[in-house]
Amino acid sequence: MDLPQDPTLLLVIFILCFILYLSLKSNWGHGNLPPGPTPLPLLGNMLEIGGDFVKSMMKLRDKYGDVFTVYLGSRPVVIVTGYKAVKEIYVDKSDYYLNRGDMPIWDDFYKNYGLALTNNIERWKELRRFSLSTLREFGFGKRSTEDRIQEETRHLIEELRKSKESFFDPRQCLSRALCNIIFSVMFGNRCEYKDEEIATVLSCIYESFVTASSPWGQIYEMFPGVMRYVPWYHKKFFKYLEKLKQYVNEKVKINQKTLDPDNPRDYIDAFLIKMEKEKGKTNSEYNMVNLLSSTLQIFFAGVEPSSSTLTYSLLLILKYPDIRAKMHKEIDQVIGRDRNPTIHDRNDMPYTEAVIHEIQRFTDPLPLGVPRKTTKEVKLQGYTLPKDINVFPLLTSVLKDPTCFKYPKEFNPENFLNEKGEFQKNSAFMPLAAGKRNCLGEALVRMKLFLFLITILQNFDLKSPLPLEEVDINPTVSGLGSFPKPYKIAFIPR
C-alpha cells in the first residue's frame, strides 16, 4: 500500500494519530470503571454534557444507573448518584474517599494550600484540627455565637424597618447580616451595612461563586490546560478571588501590628501565635500561605452558600402564604412578639424546624457536592475504582431521591413531618455533604438560618409585587451552586 505523498495530508494523519494516542493513553490503567457514554479523543463527553452539568448528569443516570463514568476532557470522573451510593462515599467507606478531588479552577488559585480545598490529607487533618479548636474557642456552636447572631438580627430588623414597606431586592441586606457573623469570628469585628468594605467583599464572593458555577466554569473543569490561557469570562473568577485574598492579607497585617500573644482576638490572631510557636519547625503547616488560604476558604464558605439559602428561603415562604401562616402561628405560640428567639426554641417548633430543613433540601445549595478522590483501590457498586480516580457524589440526587422523600420535586415541609405532625429526621438530608470532610461550620449554618429567619417572621409579614403564581422559585444557576432568581419583596410590620 502506497503512503500518501501530500505533506499536508501526512501532517493531518500524524496529528489525528497523536490525538488518538493521547486519548487511549489517558484511558489506560483505570481499572474496571463503571459504564458511561463513549468519550471523543481529548473532548471527552463534552457533547453529552452540554451547558447544564447537573441536568446532563441526571439524564445520563437514567441510561447508565446510579454510578457511571464521564470524561471531562481526557479526565475520567466517576459520577455517583442516589442516597445509597452517595452514603457509601461519604459515610460507609469514607476513608477510601478522603482526598479532595480535582477542581481545576479552584486548584489553580489555591495551589493545594488551605484547609478546605487541599488534597494533602496530613495538611487537611492538621489544619482542620486547629481550625475546629480555634473556632470553638471563639464561639462556633456555643452560646457566644448565638449571642452574636441575636445581636446581628437586631441590626437587620432595624435595617428592614427602614425600607418602610417598599419593594426591594433583599439579597444585599441579608448577605451583609450573615457576613458580619463571620467577620466577628475571623476578623474580630462587624461592619455597618452601608460600609463599602462589606459591599466589595460580598460582591467578590458572590460573583466568583457564580462564575465558577457557570458553563464557563464547567468548561474550565474539562479543559484547564487550554482555559488557563484563554482570556474569556472565566478570568473574572481569579480577579475576584485575588481581591478577596488581598483583603484577607490586609487584615493579617493589621493583626500582626497589634498582636498580643496572651490575648488572641480572632482566628487570625490564633494562627499567627501558632506560626510563631512553630517557627523554624521543618514542614510546619503554620505559614502565611496556609493562613491566607484557610482564612479565605472558611470566610468564603461561611458567607456562601448561607446568604443564598436565606435569600432563597424568603422567596419560598413568600410563594407559599399557607406555610408562612403556620410558621407565624407557631412563632406566636412558642416565642411571642417580645423576646428574641433562641436556638432551644426549635425543640418546641416542629413545623418550623421541618420548613427550615425543607428549605435546605429544596434549595439544593451544592448540587454537585465537592469532588473526592480515592485514597486506594476500592470496590463501589460492583466496580473497581483505582487509586486517585475522581469521584463526584451528586448531592442533588440525594436531596431529591424519591426513595427517601415523599415529595422529592416539591417544596413541602411534610418531607420532614410524620403522621402526628412531629419533626422527623431523615438520613438523606445532607445539603452540605456528610462524613469526615463535611462542612466545618454546618451547625453554624443551621443556627444562622433558624435565628435569622424566625426573627424576620416574628417581626414581619411578606408581600410580593407580583401575583404569587408569577413568583419564580427556579434557580438561575445550578452547578457548583444554586441561586434564586433576583426578586423584590416588601416587609410589612406585624
Image (spheres, grey):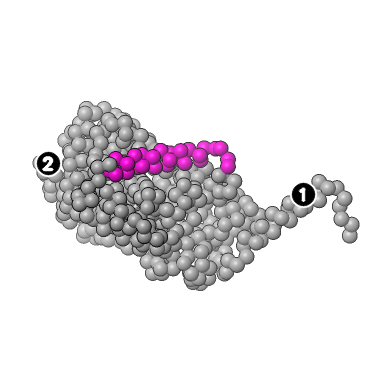
Residue 381 appears in the figure: no
- Residue 248 is inside the magenta segment: yes
- Residue 416 is inside the magenta segment: no
Mark 1 residue type: Val
Contact? badges 2 and 1 (CB < 8 Å): no
Image coordinates for residue 206, horizontal then vertical, percent: 39, 40
Image coordinates for residue 373, horizontal then vertical, percent: 47, 62
Q: Quadrant of residue 86?
A: bottom left
Residue 109 falls left or right of residue 178: right
Q: Which mark is residue 337?
A: 2
Residue 474 falls left or right of residue 61: left
Q: CA distance from mark 2 to mark 1?
A: 76 Å
User: Judging from the image, what secondary structure is the residue with disc 2 in?
Assistant: loop
Residue 344 falls left or right of residue 471: left
For this rendering, which residue is in front, 432 or 122? 122
Mark 2 residue type: Arg
Placement of the C terminus among the 4 image quadrants: top left
Residue placed at 24% from the left, 33% from the top? 192
Q: Which mark is residue 12?
A: 1
For this rendering, which residue is in front, 477 or 123? 123
For this rendering, which residue is in front, 408 or 81? 81
Image coordinates for residue 385, horizontal then vertical, percent: 52, 68
The stretch in magenta equals: 229-256
Q: Quadrant of residue 35?
A: bottom right
Q: Quadrant of residue 250?
A: top left
Crowding around mark 2 (Cα neighbors within 10 Å: few <14, some 14 to 19, many 20+) is: some
